[in-house]
Image (tube, grey):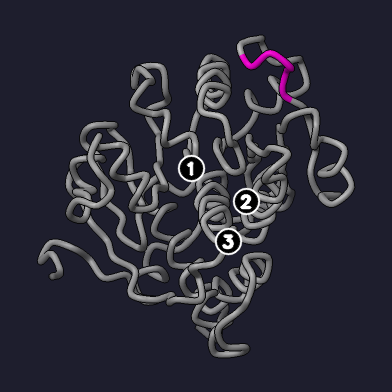
Amino acid sequence: MSNPSEVTVTPALLREWGLPDPGESKKSRGEIVVVGGSRRSPGAVFLAGEAALRVGAGRLAVIVPASIEGQLGVVMPEAAVYSLPEDADAPLEDGPRGAIESADAVLVGPGFDDSDETLATLLTIARTGVRRLILDAFALGILPRVDRSLLPAELVLNPNREEAAILLDRDPADAEPDLSEIARRYDAVVNCYGRIVTPAGERWRIQAGGAGLGTSGSGDVLAGAITGFSARGVAPARAAVWGSWAHARAGDRLTEQVGMGFLARDIPSEMTRAIAEITSARG
C-alpha cells in the first residue's frame, strides 16, 4: 500500500529540480572515489565507477586490493587506480589518501567480501575527512558496528531488503523493513528498491524498472549512479532519487529494446540516454 506522504517521481519533477551546471571542465563535474573489490568480485568496482561517469561525474579514482589493481588498470582507462594497504588497519598511502581528501563523493562497499576488512577500511576512510559518503553491499553489513559520529553528515545507504534487515538487526524473512526507521537510526538517506526516505520523513518512490534489473551487478551500477550525482553537487536525497530513477528508466529502455536478459554492464550507457530524456530540449 502506498504512503500518502510519498511523492511519486516523474520526469516533470526531475525537470523542475534540474541538475547542477556541468561547467567547462571535468573538475567542475565532481570527483568520485570507489573503494571496494576482491579477487572474487573485481568487476563490481568497474560497474560502479562507470555508472558514476555515465551520469555525468567528471573524474574517477578507484581504490582496490593490490591483488586486482593491475586488472582494473587495464579495463578502466578512465580511472586512476590505487591499492589498499596489505594490512586493512594500516593508514592509506599518499596517493589514495589524497584522492579521498579531494573527492566530492566516496562510495565504499562494491565487491568487498570480508566483513572485518571492510570495517577497517571504512574506518580508515572516515578518518580522512570524506565529505559525502555512499555505502553499499558489505559496507552496509558492518555499519551497525560503526560509531555514526565518525561518518560524515552527508550519508546515503543503498541496501537491498536483506541488508536493510541487517541494519535493523532483524530476520530478513520478517515483514518488509521500515526504511524510515533505518534513516532515523543512522541519520542517513536510504534508498531501497526505488523507495527513498530521509531522517526527516521525506519519501519518494520510483515507479519504473522491472524484473530485468534483478541481474548480477545491477546494484553496483545503482550505487555508482547515486555517487555520481552526489559528486556533481546534488543534495543526498535528490542524488538518491536521480540515481534510482536513472537506473530504473535505463532498465525500462533496455527491456523495450532487447527484452529480458540484458546485463548490468548494459545499464550505465543507457542511463546516459535516460537522463538526456529529462535534460534535452526534446524533454
Vertical placement of residue 20 versus 269, above or below: above
| Label 3 SS | loop
* Dot 3 crowding, Cα within 10 Å, few <14, some 14–19, many 20+: few
Identity, as a three-letter code, of the amino acid under mark 2 = Ala
Q: Compute the Cα span from label 3 to label 1.
A: 14 Å
Instruction: Tell me if 17 is positioned left or right of 177 in this view.
Output: right
Q: Quadrant of residue 275?
A: bottom right
Vertical placement of residue 101 versus 44, above or below: above
The residue stretch that appears in magenta: 84-88
Identity, as a three-letter code, of the amino acid under mark 3 = Ser
Residue placed under numbered mark 3 in the picture: 216
Q: Compute the Cα span from label 3 to label 2.
A: 13 Å
Residue ID at (61%, 76%):
273
Kindly identify which numbered label has been placed on residue 48.
2
Work out whether residue 167 or residue 35 is closer to the camera in this orientation and state it.
167
Residue 14: give x, y in percent of width and height: 40, 68
Identity, as a three-letter code, of the amino acid under mark 1 = Asp
Extreme residue toward the top, this view: 90
